Image (cartoon, rainbow, N blue to C red):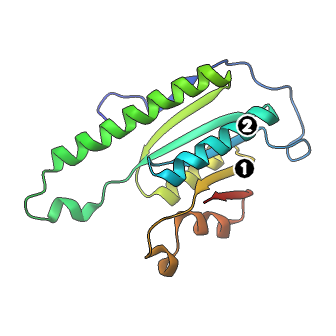
Amino acid sequence: MSVGAPDREEYGPQSRPLPFERGTDGPRVVLVGVDGTRTSERAGSYAAGLARRQGAALVVVFVNSPNGLTALLPGVDAAAVQRTQDELTAEIRKEIQRGARELGLPITFVCRRGDPYVELRDAADEFQADMVVVGASEQAGHRLVGSVATRLVRTGRWPVVVVP
């Protein structure tokens, strides 16, 4: 995230659903993690459709997590890596603004820096998410070590939908 940029932005209509008793009438806050991959785009679409059908608010969380080892590699320009991350953030922000206008859906965009699992977990708690949606990992190593999705499911605080 670039210096001075807010880490939370609201788009779309700001009316909130009527009060309800949590857990009795479908999700009221759907949180989705996005990172620019194909599976996270599908997860975002799924979450937006679900939120729209349920009359829920949508919280989109982008975690900027450049690999710390990148800076140690010879010939890698840390500033170029940061510019790439900033461009991805701007692109995701633009897509969210467009989606909020088209769907008429209240969307909160949150940009964080750090470990994706920790940041998604903390955001889900902060926004009192009723459901978390993430894309399935496409990295082979995650089958052995465990993906963000697997770690969120194991946390067991909210229903987690993993979109292929």
Q: Amino acid at mark 1?
A: Met
Q: Quadrant of the N terminus?
A: top left
Q: CA distance from mark 2 to mark 1?
A: 10 Å
Of 123 and 60, the residue lying toward us: 60
Q: Secondary structure at mark 1?
A: strand
Residue 69 vertical placement versus 106 (above, below): below
* Residue at position x 36%, y 40% in the image: 88
Figure label count: 2
Residue at the left extreme, as displayed: 75
Q: Secondary structure at mark 2?
A: helix
Callout 2 touching callout 1 (CB < 8 Å): no
The residue at which mark 2 appears reads as 51
Nearer the camera: disc 2 or disc 1: 2
Q: Amino acid at mark 2?
A: Ala
* Residue at position x 59%, y 43% in the image: 44
The residue at which mark 1 appears reads as 131
